[in-house]
Amino acid sequence: MKTLKSLLLAGGLASVLLSGCGDKVEEFDISKLSLISPKFDNTGSFFSRPQKKIGKTAEIYVSPKDEGYNAGIVEIDLYEDEKPMPIASKKVEGKNPSVKFSLKKIKLGVHTYHVVAIDKDGNQGRSKKLELEFTGRDLDLPPIISWFSMHDDELIFNGNDYGDNKGIEKTVLYEDGKKFKDFPSSSFVENLRNLKRKGKHTYFAEAVDKGGNVARSKIIRVNYGK
């Protein structure tokens, strides 16, 4: 037999349950084939060369990604100081297109840049911001270490020089802090197993450009075993 107390408790519980629903309306739009916007999900998807303080010209590299049903990017637009640059709109196609924007005759000073990628359904994805300072001077910028890592038993290095005096003259590999080998190029592959070392050894590399600027890589420690 139900008592008044039990009925009140039941009514209170029902009230609590109903009040949890409220009048909130959650909307979904399925008029588009895809609801997923393009993404810029890694450092290689939006960057400039040179970076930060530059001379007279720069290049911006863009590689967004679109996923999901009906994926595909159709347009990439470049913005300067939050305003679209009419000459910097590129028609593209594919799920992961890559484009390059060349910046020339830019007003001196600091400017911000971002891009917007538009997919086939009109979804838009916005990149992070880049801040570039155009000095107007001929700068000889140092090289950039784009890759220095181990792959299986090989030590791989790759560098780039995007300064106004372009070109890497040589790269130098160091072992345990001492110069080990020179390479007359911007990249090298060194098979460490062939060295037949024992114990632990450290390695780093330097890239030297034609202007004498030097960029040093991170340090890698390798255990050769006993």
Image (cartoon, rainbow, N blue to C red):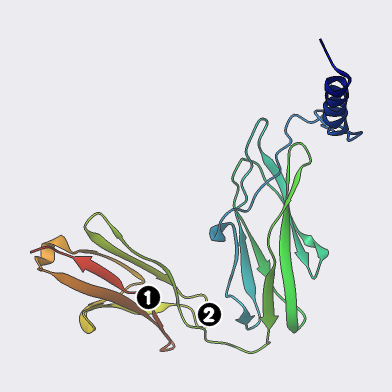
Determine whether, in the image, residue 149 is placed left or right of residue 95. Answer: left
Position of residue 90 measured from the top left corner of the image (x, y, whole percent) = 72, 53
Residue that appears at 92% across and 33% down: 23
Tell me which residue sits at (37%, 75%) in the image: 217
Residue at 24% across / 83% down in the picture? 177
* 14 lies left or right of 180: right
Q: Quadrant of residue 81?
A: bottom right
Vertical order, 32 against 39 (above or below) = above
- Give the image location of residue 18, x and y in percent: 86, 28
Apparent side of residue 145 relative to residue 180 in the rendered image (left or right): right
Q: Residue at x 72, y 68 (%)?
A: 113
Q: Distance between the residues labelled 1 and 2?
A: 18 Å
| Three-letter amino acid code of the residue under disc 1 | Ser
Residue 126, relative to residue 123: is it above or below?
Answer: below
Q: Are marks 1 and 2 in contact (CB under 8 Å)?
A: no
| Farthest-out residue, top | 1
The numbered disc on residue 217 is 1
Instruction: Count residues near mark 1 (Cα–Cα under 10 Å), then give few for <14, some for 14-19, many for 20+.
Output: some
> Could you tell whether 92 is left or right of 152 in the image?
right
Image mark count: 2
* Position above or below: 159 against 13: below
Q: Quadrant of residue 57?
A: bottom right
